[in-house]
Image: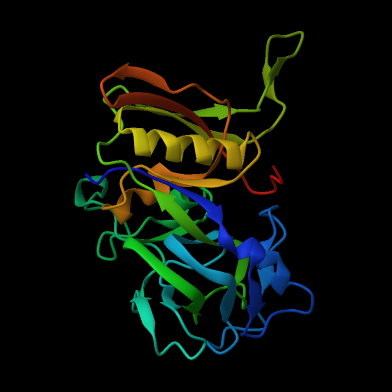
Amino acid sequence: MANAILAAPNRIEAATLSGGDWLAGSRPNLASRPYGQAAQSNGLNPTATQFTLTLDQPRSLRVLALLAHNLGSLAQVRWRVSLDAAFSQSVFDSGWSPVWPALPTPDMRWSDANWWSGTLDEERRAFYPRHHFTVLPDERLGAFVRCELNDPSNPDGAIKIGRAGVYDGWQPIINFSYGAKLGHETSERIVKSEAGLPYSSGGNVGRVAQIAFEHLSATEARAMMDLERRLGLAGELIYIADPADPGSFTHQAFPARLRELSPIDWVGFDTRQKSFLLEELIQGSGT
C-alpha cells in the first residue's frame, strides 16, 4: 500500500482549453465545478475526443482526473504532460491505458460475466460515480497537458465529461494511522405511512473518510496549513487512499471537500498530528 495522496488545487481553472471537437459551448464544462454540466464530444472519432490544457505557467502536477464521465468498460485514455506546446519536451506519458482498471482477483467470482476482463461490471459500476484517476509516479513540472480518449463502442455515441482535473498533490512521508474510516452517508429519509409502510424520500449516497496523520514533520504541517487555508470548506480536492492500487480507485478515491477545519497538534519534538474529515462531492454538486 502506498501512502495516501490529497490532491489540490485543480490547475484547470486557470488554464486555456483547446483541441478536439466538442458540442458548441460545452467544452468549457471541462473546467466547471458542477459535475452534472458535461462537455460532450461530436461523435467518437479520436480526433474529436481529446483536449489540451495550456496552464497559466509551469505547474507541479501529481493527479490527472476525468470526473463524472460516461466512458465504457473498454475505453482507453492517454495523458501527456509537457513543457512545450509541441509535446516534444515530455515529462510524462501514460501511454494508452484502461479507463477502468482491473479489480483485484479476490473481488471477482468465477460466475461473473466480467471475470476475464477483470473490470467492474455495469451493474456494480452503476452504484458509484464514474471517475477516472491517473497518478503520476512523482511530482512533474508541466505547462501543457493533453488527454486523448478512445471509446469506439460507447453506446451514447459521444463522450461526456463532467469535469477534468490536473492537480498538484501532497503525499506524507508516513501514511495515515490505523483507525482510519471510510463509509457512506445519505440524504435519503424514510417516511412511514399510517399503516407503518416505509417510503423513501429519495436522495444521494456519498462517501465520508476520516483519516489522521500522526507523524508529520514541521514542513509537512505547514503544507497542511497551506492546503486548509486554500480550500476552506468548499474547495475541491481529490482523495486517493492507495495510489499504488488503481483497482481500489472506484471504492477508495473520490473528489471531496473538507467538512471541518482541525488544528495541528504538536505532540513531540518535530512531530505534529493533523486529522481530516472528508466529504465526497457528488455529481451536480457545485460546492
Image quarter hosting the N terminus: top left
**Whole-percent x and y of residue 229?**
59, 37
Residue 234 drawn above or below residue 184? below
Residue 56 pos. (x, y %): 61, 70
Residue at 73% across, 9% down:
195
Question: Can residue 257 be seen by looking at this rendering?
Answer: yes
Image location (x, y in percent) of residue 242: 30, 46
Residue 274 placement: quadrant: top left
Q: Residue at x 74, y 72 (%)?
A: 26
Residue 162 at least partly seen: no
Residue 143 higher or lower than 181, as above or below: below
Q: Is residue 98 left or right of residue 143?
A: left
Q: Quadrant of residue 281?
A: top right
Q: Position of residue 4 (x, y in %)?
A: 33, 43
Tally of marks? 0
Establish if 84 lies above or below 194. Answer: below
